[in-house]
Structure formats: C-alpha cells, structure tokens
C-alpha cells in the first residue's frame, strides 16, 4: 500500500520504518522547515529497545547509549537514599533487551538514518492544512495535493488529526505541572566531591519531595559525556506560555530548599528549558470511520512523564501497526477495517494502563511531608530492590514484568493466532451445518 505518515517525530519515524521494512511505499510529511532538537535525554526501556533492535535502528544509536545500573530514589531535602532497584541486570536477563539513556537528538538522527536506508522520503516544510480521510487525501501549505491508501497521523500532543478522527474537539489537558530541563557537560562537575557520583555511575537518580521530583542521568553525547537533569514541579510560568528558555535563577528558586548538591550543580548552569506539561484524555477510538486514517503516538495517547514511557508507547504503536500490515491477511486496502480494529484492540488498553500508572507514580513520589510520607519512606527503606506487591510501582515485580517485559511481536502473534482459531471455529461450524443440511436433503 501507499502510506503517508504525518509527523517526523519519534513515533512517526518508527512507524514509517516498520511499514517500509515490510514493503509498503511510505512518505513522511513534516511541518518544520528543518529538523531541530528540543529537549535532552530520553529513556528507552526494554519494551522499546527490543523494537528498535528488530527494526535495525540500534546500529545507528548504540554508541550513544548508556545503560543505567539501577534506579535510586532519594529524600528531597538531604538526599538520603530511600530505595534502589536494579535496571541493567533485569533488562538483559529477564526482559531480553537493554535499558538505555540517550540524547533525543542522537536518537532522532538514528531514526532518520534508518529511514534513509529504507528509501523513505521525508518532506520538510510540509505542514498539512487539509485532510480528506474518506478519500484519503491531504493538502500541504505549499498547495501539494497527495492521495494515498492510508494516513497515519503522528502529529503530536496538539494534533489536528485527532479532532478529525473523533469528530469533536479533544484538546490537551494541563497537568498543573511543568519541567525545567538542564543538560551540561559532565566535566563541569569534575573535582566537586559531592557531585562526583553523578558523573561516574550511570544510574537513574530520583529526588522525591512535595509537589516535585528531580531526575538525573548520564548521556553519551556526540562529543562528550553529558549530565541530564529534569526538574518537575507545579507550574511557575506565565499564563499562555507553554515553553521558553529560562535561567538557573528560575529553577534554583523553585527548588531552593532541596538537597544542597542540587543548588551547587545549578550554579554551573546558564540556560534552562522550561516546559509546561500536558496530557490527553483517553479516547474510545484512534481510527477514522472511513478506516483510512489512524492516530499514533502522542496524537492518540499523550501521557504524563512520570514513568518515562511516552516515547516507548509510540514506538510500540509503530511496531504493532507495521506488524499487522505486514500480514498477508491484513495488508490490503480491503482489509484495513479489520487491521485497524486489531491495532486498537492491542494498543488502547495497553496505553491506558501505562497512562494510569504514570499518574499514580506522580502522587506516590510527590507526597507532602507528613505521616503518610514517613510511612512510605520507612517502607521503602525496609524493602530495597524489586519485590512482588511493592508499594513503589517502579519496584513492583508484576508491574515491571508487564511494562518492560512487553514483546510487541509476541503480543501480535498471540492475537493473530486467536483470530485464526476463531475463524477456523466459524468455518468448522459452517461446514458441520452444511453436512447436517445435506444429510436431511
């Protein structure tokens, strides 16, 4: 089939690669005039790294990835360690694929390189201004008119295609929180004893406190090792402003009473990216009634960042959709209704579960100081590592198995087998009815 993907972000390029790798003719339309990189680090857990490896993307990004040994949660004020749980070992030994940290720019460059290998054309400065999903066709701001067999809309949080699919407005929902993003060369922290651990041990460092969290981890940059910090807190931005460049004074003020190491680090920072956080309400369908247009990634299910799974869910979407449309039973325009129905069946409940868990993680880590917080901290101190039934979702064995142990290929193959079994049962029943009818006659 001929397929147009709207949006050259992480989910858009992943699905384009997944589709092209199985023989579909894919082009990508991107509204930006050039590909630039806003943001910093990104976490690639086993459920998504497994997909990147199967799609041949890993060879373009592996040298820029670090593998965190564990996740450490610390008390906000003095940095007391509350709990540690391993990341690297279970990723490799239990979930069968690495847990990576990588700079978003390096990740995106790797996707673009793999797309180029597969002959995927990316049209820049091609904002879509009109979509006709019943045809399907679309028109870009340059007046270019394109017809296709399927439109895959990966146009992000502020998706215009989402409204077209639903037939009503479904705008992003403010979370009431924002992030300050900071990236600086690790060498800037060298020689400062209390900060040395942050640049020598690859791990997820989390400070948890009232209405806020801080996350830090190492990145293998193109030219040097970087330290990535993400400060999450209640919104402290002007109304109507969703993103801006700030200074270290902004974030130092917001986190002034936290672990003294944080303020020492921030004294070395010049520029801070401030970003308001939104999510999307869960929606009942991702497919237009025509079955010729479908949503993917943040356009379908933008979620809070507290579990670092937003990109992973988009990557899973791409693998599942590409995998379905690679099947002989589902790879034609005639079978698109059934194919997209299967895609929704495999993805909507999964992403809703992760979105709900992400919200739960926010309230668990951002408790006000008090009795509940003290009980939480005492329990964490007494239960290091990964346990069944752990009160910390990031240490709960059964949840991690469901999240990180997810195998897109396996999930798809199980559903395909179930569909075939159902079809065989219907055929068998029809044949038996025919035999009985013939015997009567």
Image (spheres, rainbow, N blue to C red):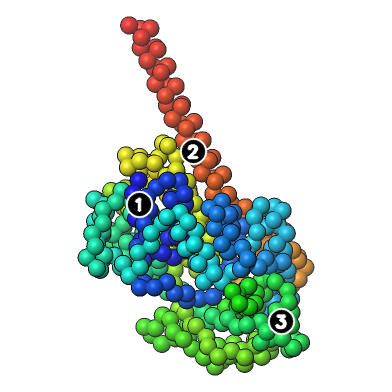
> Vertical placement of 125 versus 345: above or below?
below
Residues packed near mark 2 inside 10 Å, few (<14), some (14 to 19) or many (20 plus): some
Specify the quadrant that holds the C terminus.
top left
Pointer 1 or 2: first along the chain: 1
What is the number of the mark on residue 3? 1
Q: Is residue 80 above or below residue 120?
A: below
**Left or right of residue 384, residue 209 in this image:** left
The mark nearer the N terminus, 2 or 3, is 3
Residue 333 quadrant? top left
Q: Label 3, on which residue?
A: 79
Q: CA distance from mark 1 to mark 2?
A: 22 Å
- Image marks 1 and 3: residues in contact by CB distance under 8 Å: no
- Measured from the top left, where is residue 378 in percent x and y? 74, 72
Which residue occupies the foreground of this view, 328 or 430? Answer: 328
Gap in Å between the C-alphas at discs 2 and 3? Answer: 49 Å
Residue 366 badge: none
User: In percent of the image, x 47 and y 56: which residue is there?
Assistant: 117
Q: For mark 2, what is the residue?
A: 416
Q: Residue at x 76, y 71 (%)?
A: 381
**Which of pointers 2 and 3 indicates the residue nearer the eye?**
2
Give the secondary structure at mark 3.
Answer: loop
Query: How many numbered marks does the figure carry?
Result: 3
Q: Position of residue 82 (x, y in %)?
A: 73, 73
Q: Are marks 1 and 2 in contact (CB under 8 Å)?
A: no
* Nearer to the camera, 224 or 301: 224
Q: Can you tell which of label 1 and label 3 is closer to the viewer? A: 1
Pointer 1 local density, CA inside 10 Å: few below 14, some 14–19, many at least 20: many
* Residue toward you, 240 or 101: 101
Compute the Cα span from label 1 to label 3.
51 Å
Q: Which residue appears at 42% of the width and 55% of the height? A: 119
**Residue 232 screen position, x and y as percent:** 55, 78
């Amino acid at each position: 089939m001929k397929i147009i993907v709207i949006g050259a972000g992480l989910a858009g390029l992943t699905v384009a690669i997944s589709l092209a790798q199985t023989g579909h003719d894919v082009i990508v339309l991107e509204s930006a005039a050039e590909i630039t990189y806003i943001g910093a680090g990104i976490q690639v857990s086993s459920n998504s790294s497994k997909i990147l490896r199967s799609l041949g993307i890993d060879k373009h990004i592996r040298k820029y990835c670090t593998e965190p040994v564990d996740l450490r949660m610390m008390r906000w004020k003095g940095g007391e360690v509350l709990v540690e749980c391993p990341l690297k070992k279970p990723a490799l030994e239990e979930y069968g694929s690495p847990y990576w940290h990588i700079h978003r720019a390096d990740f995106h460059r790797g996707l673009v390189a793999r797309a180029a290998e597969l002959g995927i054309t990316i049209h820049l400065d091609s904002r879509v201004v009109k979509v006709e999903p019943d045809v399907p066709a679309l028109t870009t701001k340059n007046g270019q008119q394109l017809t296709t067999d399927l439109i895959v809309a990966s146009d992000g949080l502020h998706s215009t295609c989402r409204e077209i699919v639903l037939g009503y407005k479904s705008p992003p929902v403010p979370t009431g929180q924002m992030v300050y993003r900071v990236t600086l060369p690790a060498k800037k922290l060298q020689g400062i004893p209390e900060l040395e651990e942050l640049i020598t041990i690859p791990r997820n460092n989390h400070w948890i406190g009232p209405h806020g969290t801080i996350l830090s981890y190492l990145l293998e940059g193109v030219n040097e090792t970087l330290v990535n910090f993400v400060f999450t807190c209640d919104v402290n931005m002007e109304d109507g402003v969703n993103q801006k460049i700030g200074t270290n004074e902004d974030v130092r003020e917001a986190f002034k009473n936290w672990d003294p190491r944080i303020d020492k680090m921030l004294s070395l920072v010049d520029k801070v990216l401030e970003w308001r956080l939104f999510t999307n309400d869960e929606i009942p369908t991702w497919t237009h009634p025509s079955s010729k247009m479908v949503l993917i990634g943040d356009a379908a299910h933008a979620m809070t960042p507290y579990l670092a799974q937003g990109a992973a869910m988009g990557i899973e979407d791409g693998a599942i959709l590409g995998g379905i449309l690679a099947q002989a039973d589902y790879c034609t325009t005639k079978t698109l209704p059934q194919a997209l129905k299967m895609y929704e069946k495999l993805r909507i409940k999964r992403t809703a579960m992760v979105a709900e868990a992400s919200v739960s993680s926010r309230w668990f880590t951002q408790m006000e100081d008090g009795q509940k917080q003290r009980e939480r901290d005492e329990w964490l101190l007494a239960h290091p590592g990964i346990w069944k039934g752990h009160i910390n979702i990031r240490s709960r064995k059964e949840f991690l198995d469901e999240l990180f142990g997810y195998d897109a290929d396996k999930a798809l193959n199980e559903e395909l087998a179930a569909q075939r079994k159902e079809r065989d049962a219907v055929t068998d029943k029809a044949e038996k009815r025919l035999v009985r009818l013939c015997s009567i006659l």
